[in-house]
Image (cartoon, rainbow, N blue to C red):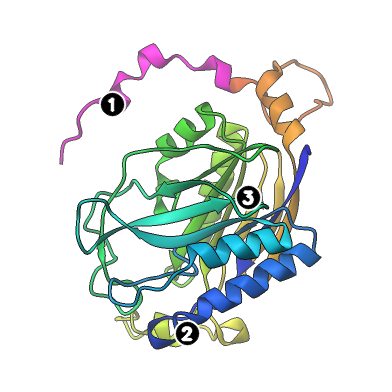
Amino acid sequence: MSTVRLGLAQTMTHFGDDEERNLENAVALIEHAARQDIDLLAFAENYPGPFTESNRYEVDAVMAESARTHGVAVAYGTSRPAPGRDGSFHITTVIVDSQGVERGAYHRTHPEGPYIYRDGKQWNFDYVAAEAFPVVDMGWGKLAVSICSEVHLPEVSRILALKGAEIILYPSGLLIDELGYTENWRTLVRARAIENHAYTATLVNLMDPAVGAQFNRSGVELAPPRNSITTGIGGIYGPERVLAESGEPGLLTADLDLDRIRYLRAASEELIVPAPYRTIPGHMTWRRPELYGELTRPRTR
């Protein structure tokens, strides 16, 4: 198929004693996605969990079975043990196809740990950054993931695009809107689509406003949230236009024409008015890697 219906599952996230409810909700959302003819359903960072070292529960088998039962490919978030490091974990997005077969998994690579995942009420484990950028062949197209604030690092997305990724997901953690990042976040996700001739999408865990309130050290009164939960940042973007945006809970969807991505990558720019495209095609072929040594120069702190 050349057209893929992408769905983003913007849903209430539970923590602590209620955390395993996320798994029940995820299964229900996969069923809803099937009713909407969604081909690929994406969840937020680490959803449906586990979020902590102490409260571990099985998600992989359940999510794979649900994907197979309902015929929906799923990209879901979890934490997986880091090999050889007891009590340490990767932040991971797992990709299973519509037959329930795991096609691949992306472990977050940036920043190096430690980061924000230790000794919190939401996350609590030793985070380990990985060192690989997998691109997953789904049969109908190539899919990749870059997690949360990695969207600020264009190198990650460019590597994925150069490896053939046609859809790049940016599952995010929490409180993006409450922190005041939404406008920039969506701009960056859209920029990644334009500069890499790819479809990109982002979403975040929604939660009870009390979770966000604990971080409001300034005491500034915040606007009341919609639907008694924090605000989402959902967005789906193509290299030529915005396909869908919403901060509301539910399934945000868009149809992605992969043939269009392949055309834009293969075509050469011509001065035709009106142009048959809304972005400059073929610009990935302009790259001059011999000039880019500064990108790999060892950093200075």
Q: Residue furthest left?
A: 301
Q: Is residue 97 above or below residue 8?
A: above
Task: Specify the label residue 209 is tagged with.
Answer: 2
Nearest-to-viewer mark from 3 and 2: 3
Q: From the image, which quarter does the C terminus lie in?
A: top left
Secondary structure at badge 1 equals helix
Task: Specify the label residue 97 is tagged with.
Answer: 3
Q: Earlier in the sequence, mark 3 or mark 2?
A: 3
Q: CA distance from mark 1 to mark 3?
A: 35 Å
Secondary structure at badge 3 equals loop
Task: Specify the label residue 270 is tagged with.
Answer: none
Q: Residue at x 55, y 49 (%)?
A: 169
Q: Is residue 288 above or below residue 82?
A: above
**Magenta segment boundaries in residue numbering:** 284-301
Q: Earlier in the sequence, mark 1 or mark 2?
A: 2
Q: Amino acid at mark 1?
A: Thr
Q: CA distance from mark 3 to mark 2?
A: 34 Å
User: Mark 1 sits on what residue?
Assistant: 296
Can the viewer see residue 85? yes
